[in-house]
Amino acid sequence: MTSLQNHFVKDSNPDTLYQLVSDISRWGKELGFQQVGITDTNLAAAEIQLLDWLQSGFHGEMGYMERHGSKRSRPAELEPGSIRVISVRMDYLPEPSANPLAVLGNPALGYVSRYALGRDYHKVVRKRLQQLADHITAAVGDFGYRVFVDSAPVLEKPLAEKAGLGWIGKHSNLLHERTGSWFFLGEIYTDLPLPIDTPAENHCGSCQSCIDICPTQAIVAPYKVDARRCISYLTIELKTAIPEEFRPLLGNRIYGCDDCQLVCPWNKFAAPTDETDFLPRGDLDAPTLIELFAWSEEHFLKYTEGSPIRRIGHHRWLRNIAVALGNAPTSPEVVLALKSHQEHPESLVREHVIWALTQHT
């Protein structure tokens, strides 16, 4: 990002900048964002919480959370010249899709987190953010900016909270009082001195439904999640074996977990997305475990093309499904499916298959 040399800003009065903010919000909504907010880059309070979280080791094998030092909590160090952040949210709750509670209640099915049912959100949100930046360029001329969608060391939730998009709930997800938490976030770091929005207020109150429902008790305290216990971490981020103590608790969750969102009272206000890219693909909203376990790597790559699921690779996909089959009721079909991978060439798969078979002995 270059230093601020924009003639529009130099020659503008406050009213002109407020009009630009209004235009940015309008353009954002036309591009499919449900909300746009603007904040400064001061994340001092969030930095203290991040350092405490890292010191506690709650990030597990996610070494990238500490690899970039203070760049994550100090935007101007990541992108020099940044003084403002344009934060956006895009709803993703798919409909029509199978009822998530019904899928969780059927051990023959595999549960995939609702965010991963459709097209990879990184591509969708990034493209729209770039279009938003192009609108700004057309209005003010060249300016310094950089687009982010969960693609760099960015504290997106604290930034969104400061920008008025919602508050960080006790489960560590961002919540909005009119739309719940089923949405993606994205950011534009910029050198434009835009007026900022009022931070959101916390409305969790005394509710702790998310804490009580967590299958692995990963929410170790309000607003503090130990990722090493979190099912989303265990099935997506963890590259090695899933600790045995957690395997029975995964149930039939094979990619991510939505339990804390499913019970959150604020999500009764959530509206289905209008984005066709986020609609379920390949019947993954209620897939049969045995059928998924039979996928070859070729099938896996074919059926997860354009999906965030592909990032875990075929071996971890089989690892997760093996655990779910181990938790399923014993039947000849389940045992036969597991035995089909008992001699799998990948030790990670074999270990979990053997564990799963012992559950049916």
Image: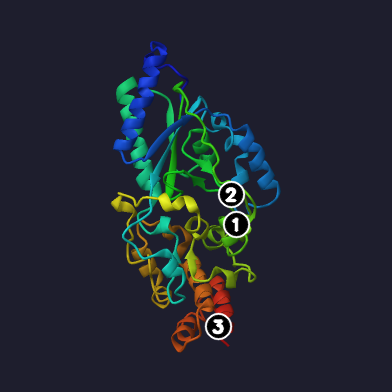
Q: Nearer the viewer, residue 139 or 249?
A: 249
Point out the frontmost of discs 2 and 3. Answer: 2
Mark 3 and mark 1 in contact (Cβ < 8 Å)?
A: no
Quadrant assignment, res 290: bottom left
Spatial separation of the CA atoms under disc 2 and disc 3? 37 Å
Place of residue 335 in the rendered image (x, y in percent of width and height, measured from the top left)? 49, 85
Mark 1 and mark 2 in contact (Cβ < 8 Å)?
A: yes
Point out the frontmost of discs 1 and 3. Answer: 1
Task: Write the residue at 42% across / 44% down.
Answer: 178
Local packing at callout 2 (Cα closer than 10 Å; few below 14, some 14-19, many 20+) is: many
Quadrant assignment, res 285: bottom left
Examine the rendering and report whether any part of residue 347 can be seen: yes
Lower position in the chain sequence, tag 1 or tag 3: 1
From the image, tell me which residue sits under label 1.
Answer: 211
From the image, tell me which residue sits under label 2.
Answer: 170
From the image, tell me which residue sits under label 3.
Answer: 357
Spatial separation of the CA atoms under disc 1 and disc 3? 31 Å
Lower position in the chain sequence, tag 2 or tag 1: 2
Q: Nearer the viewer, residue 248 or 188?
A: 248
